[in-house]
Amino acid sequence: MKEPPLSTNLSLLSLLMNFVFVLAVAAQDVSPYQPRLQNSKSGDVHDFPLGVLSATGRLEDGDRAILVVDVGDRGAASRGGLMVGDRIVLIRGQQPHAYSKSTDSGLDGPQTELAIALEQACAEPPHRLQLSVERNEESLQLSVDVPPSSAFAESFPGRCPKSEKYLASIADHLAATQQQNGSWRPGVGGDADVYAGAFCALALLVANNEAHLPSIQRAIDFIKQKSISTIDPADPKVGPKNWQAASSAILLAEYQLATGDDAYFADLKKCCDLLALRVSENGTMGHHVQIPYGGGGLVIVNVQAHLGWALAEKCGYDVNAAAWARSFEEVRKSIHQPTGAVGYSSRATWSPDIAARTGAMAAALAIREQEPELVAQFRDALVAHQGRMRHAHAMSSIGLIYGFAGLKLADPESHKLVLQKWKPYLELCRTSSGSAAYFGGKRNIGGDQYLGLPAIGNATVALVLASGQEKLFLHGGKQQDWFGATDR
């Protein structure tokens, strides 16, 4: 094993940097406003954060006005006079276009128009947002002071100052809210902290701050102890769920590629081997060993396994060719021909939420430089149906994370165009403290509630922001040992 440039045994310098970082964040508010969201599985109502206003809005199909359902204490909305029950009818004197609960409509309507107005107000003196509201049949004009900030550059998918500051603030927040055992607080108990922790650690990694190295390693050690250590190489029935094994593999591979530290390679191999053993004879995969839905399986598990294998191969892992081929054939059979996207399974090819499966498989194939025509087909599907980006198996997180990763690897120009359309999402997630609030889809967000909305919300925004760069191999990175370099 080569000597890692960033040893897992924390050096005196690392300890000192971590101590300085902890002192720096200790005085910060690590509990910024969190929107109060109702999970509407049918899409009858859609709750979402109002950005730096520190409030929660609600829309129903056809609405042009945003109903205010929560206002945070001492936030911009509260100081500006906005109250629960108000309906925002005009934004900077303009009536928004109608909202549609159709997933294909994306962020069109009041969400995009509020985000644009917020961005302009934060960027331009006197930093005030003009709103017209209806309150108890009375019309009121409110002038809300918002925190100043620089505007997103037109070249936002690159490295503009605002996006870099946003990513750094999210990383600082994640480091400050990490629990002592290395995990982040999940929405429920069980194994949610392992899956969510992998994405949080990826967000810390891509922020490229050596002061966060101890936090990243604590997260990996937690995942190793709680999940990877339970793997029995001789018995695939033993060990974590496949979701955990795949996310752990993705994190460990990106960590090794970024730092040059191969101390966790044996754990990476365990995760990848387990996934290979759990591919059934007909290529299907499930949450664990059993294949659900009458043997139909879940292709969302297959594609995450492929992504883990592809990244691990870059670290020296020998991919099981037979398992890859069987699983890939199931993915092929799951493609919905009218859209060109990956469906739920070979038995259910149609799907309204395509981003996570299609993006993850596009990324895996692009990393291995395989099937360029299929990668281009997946790119076209993601672009044509970009409005569905935050809908994936009762989750928004993996739709956005894998959707933008697949787009970036498939075609940077297409990625740039779609990310421009999603700037309003990033603006409405942005809190006054610089971290991110969770902003889910128009349907069921129960999967993300399971993971814990504050943690997964920050990780999701961080990885969407980072998709505009080329550090992680998930986002087209080619350079290894980049972590800690000041020119990256």
Image (cartoon, helix red, strand yellow):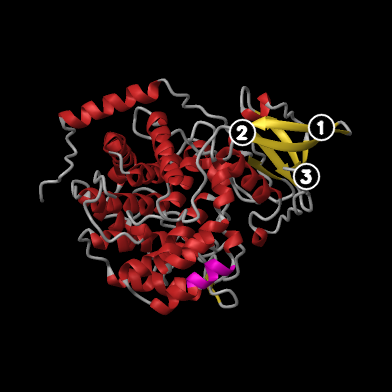
Q: Please tell me which residue lies in front, 137 or 94.
A: 94
**Which residue is identified by label 3?**
65
Q: Is 372 on the left or on the right of 145, as rendered? A: left
Residue 327 percent location from the top left of the image: 39, 69
Q: If you read the primary sequence from the N terminus, does the residue marked by circle 2 or circle 3 appear first?
A: 3
Residue 233 appears in the figure: no
State the separation of the CA atoms marked 2 and 3: 25 Å
Which stretch is magenta?
378-384
Q: Main secondary structure of the magenta part?
A: helix
Choose mark 1 or mark 3, whichever is in front. 1
Q: Residue at x 33, y 39 (%)?
A: 226
Residue 383 lies in the magenta-colored region: yes
Q: If you read the primary sequence from the N terminus, does the residue marked by circle 1 or circle 2 appear first?
A: 2
State the separation of the CA atoms marked 1 and 2: 20 Å
Q: Please tell me which residue lies in front, 100 or 360.
A: 100
The type of residue carrying mark 1 is: Leu
Q: Residue at x 48, y 42 (%)?
A: 456
**Which residue is identified by label 1?**
140
Mark 3 surroundings within 10 Å by alpha-carbon count, few (fewer than 14), some (14 through 19), many (20 or more)? many
The type of residue carrying mark 3 is: Ala
